Image (tube, coloured by chain):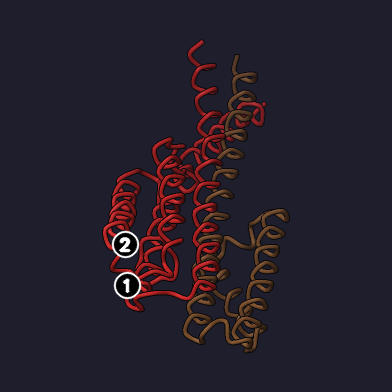
């Protein structure tokens, strides 16, 4: 009898513990803007990198535009709650001391022109980095969809 | 160039980024990371060949190796994020099931 009474309390305590600990597992919801910008910047970056065998000075404006887009995304992602992973990924791309997109532009600017073989290899690296970001954002879509369905079902 | 040493360094980056999370990963996630390391090996071999043939300078070669290290960090972050999403789902299901049981017992 005592056990029967205590059981719901025990289950409630487990639920409460799980709910309280939810913050640890929270991640930002899917964001169409983030997804779209990642795709757009990936395409734009590939176009810019295509020209890296030519003098940097001929493409300064385009390079600065791409860097500005990256910086905007870092600020955008930084202001979303529970978004530390996406933010860290964007920061790697935008960090000129790392060797992905911003780092490539920094090297191009420093060297003037780049070896076409390096350009081609670096393009694959940067494209792969964007794909990781895009795939991750895509995974959030399923999570967001599930939360919305749960919410709608609760309201019905 | 000692490709094995570079691969060991890449693995180090991976484990450093993941920290304690790695042990909790599912088999599929670990397999995905292993596949990524395998792909890294392929790239390193190709770059080493290009370096040996004089198609890449040592500076460019080092730049690419470092880029793979940065990519490895991004891969680790991505896997950590995906596993966080799955854990969140699992937790929600557990809470729902427990709430259902409590309801059944109380009503």
In terms of sequence position, does the residue under pointer 1 or pointer 2 come before the other? 2
Above/below status of A7 relative to A95: above
Q: Which residue is mark 1?
A: A109
Task: Assess disc 2: are there few (<14), some (14-19) or many (≥20) residues with their C-alpha within 10 Å of its C-alpha.
Answer: some
Pointer 1 and pointer 2 on the same chain: yes
- Asked if residue B13 lies left or right of residue A70, the reply is right
Foreground: B52 or A34? B52
* Residue visible at 50% across and 82% down in the picture: B62
Q: Quadrant of the N terminus of chain A?
A: top right
Query: Is disc 2 placed on a helix, strand or loop?
Result: helix
Q: Which residue is mark 2?
A: A59
Of the chain colours in the picture, the one used for chain A is red
Foreground: A23 or A58? A58
Q: Chain of mark 1?
A: A
* Residue visible at 62% across and 89% down in the picture: B1
Q: What percent of the width, then of the height, locates residue A12?
A: 54, 32
Query: Is disc 1 placed on a helix, strand or loop?
Result: helix
Of the chain colours in the picture, the one used for chain B is brown
For marks 1 and 2, give the CA distance: 10 Å
């Amino acid at each position: 009898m005592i056990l029967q009474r205590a059981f719901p309390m025990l289950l409630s305590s487990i639920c409460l513990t799980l709910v309280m600990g939810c913050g640890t597992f929270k991640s930002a919801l899917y964001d169409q803007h983030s997804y779209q910008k990642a795709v757009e910047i990936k395409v734009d970056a590939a176009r810019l990198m295509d020209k890296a065998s030519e003098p940097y000075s001929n493409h300064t404006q385009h390079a600065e535009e791409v860097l500005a887009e990256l910086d905007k995304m870092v600020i955008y992602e930084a202001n979303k709650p529970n978004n530390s992973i996406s933010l860290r990924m964007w920061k790697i791309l935008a960090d000129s001391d790392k060797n992905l997109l911003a780092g490539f532009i920094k090297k191009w600017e420093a060297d003037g022109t780049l070896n076409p073989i390096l350009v081609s290899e670096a393009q694959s690296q940067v494209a792969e980095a964007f794909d990781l970001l895009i795939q991750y954002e895509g995974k959030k879509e399923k999570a967001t969809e599930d939360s919305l369905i749960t919410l709608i079902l609760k309201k019905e | 160039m000692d490709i094995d040493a570079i691969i060991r360094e890449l693995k180090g980056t991976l484990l450093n980024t993941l920290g304690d999370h790695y042990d909790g990963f599912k088999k599929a996630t670990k397999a995905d990371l292993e596949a990524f390391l395998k792909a890294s090996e392929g790239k390193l071999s190709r770059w080493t060949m290009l370096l040996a043939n004089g198609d890449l300078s040592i500076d460019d070669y080092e730049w690419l190796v470092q880029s793979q290290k940065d990519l490895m960090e991004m891969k680790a972050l991505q896997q950590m994020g995906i596993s966080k999403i799955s854990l969140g789902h699992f937790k929600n299901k557990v809470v729902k099931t427990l709430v259902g049981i409590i309801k059944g017992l109380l009503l």
